[in-house]
Image: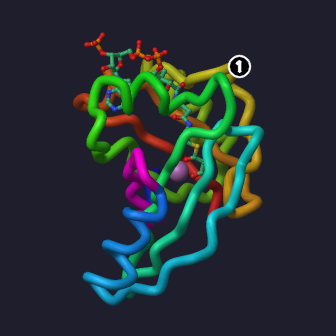
Amino acid sequence: MIGRLNHVAIAVPDLEAACAVYRDALGATVSAPLPQPDHGVTVVFVELPNTKIELLHPLGEASPIAAFLSKSPAGGIHHICYEVEDILAARDHMKAEGKRVLGDGEPRLGAHGKPVLFLHPKDFNGTLVELEQA
Ligand SMILES: CC[C@@H](C(=O)O)C(=O)SCCNC(=O)CCNC(=O)[C@H](O)C(C)(C)COP(=O)(O)OP(=O)(O)OC[C@H]1O[C@@H](n2cnc3c(N)ncnc32)[C@H](O)[C@@H]1OP(=O)(O)O
Ligand SMILES: [Co+2]
């Protein structure tokens, strides 16, 4: 069911410092910060030849990454995003497999303007999984 690796997301306490690491130390192309108020995060995309790194910083009072950063104040890998051809078929398949789809189970538009869903980390070897419709 899963296709390409779309991105690996890293939660960071200091977005500009994290951008500097990828832009200046590693020589990558780094996007401008993109506020995503519906998701409670500001994101920066780092373009790599074969995938992307998504730098995540909390936005607003109820950010889903606030608890993660309080447990890991220096930041860390937060989720991994796989592409799927059909997000609703993927959701229904995950449910049939007994995997927990987070939220109300309805896809929302992600940072690329495409429908996304999240799957519980406890069902995927301790890794939060995002599915994005290709
Ligand atoms: C920009 C848009 C979009 C895109 O287009 O790319 C994004 O990527 S948005 C990214 C941010 N959005 C989300 O993360 C939404 C989905 N997340 C959630 O629904 C919640 O964060 C969560 C995963 C359900 C956890 O929330 P909560 O239950 O409130 O936190 P706890 O701290 O109580 O965690 C319970 C349990 O799970 C472990 N955990 C939590 N987060 C992660 C994680 N990222 N990776 C691995 N494990 C995680 C946490 O440690 C707890 O474990 P125990 O302590 O053992 O119970
Ligand atoms: Co993501």
Per the rendered image, the range of residues in magenta is 4-14
Classify 16 as above or below 96.
Answer: below
- Figure quadrant of the C terminus: bottom right
Image height check: is 103 above or below 93? Answer: above
Residue 68 x %, y %: 38, 28
Q: How packed is label 1: few (under 14 Cα within 10 Å), some, or many (20 or more)?
A: few
Q: Secondary structure of the magenta portion, mostly?
A: strand
What scheme was used to colour the molecule?
A: rainbow
- Residue at position x 69%, y 51% from top? 110
Q: Quadrant of residue 20?
A: bottom left
111 horizontally vs 3: left or right: right
Q: Is residue 113 placed above or below 121 in the rendered structure?
A: below
At x 23% / y 31%, what residue is drawn?
125
Residue that carries the numbered disc 1 in the rendered image: 104
Instruction: List x then y, in percent, for residue 35.
Output: 71, 54
Q: Is residue 132 magenta?
A: no
On the image, the x and y values in percent for residue 124 come to 31, 31
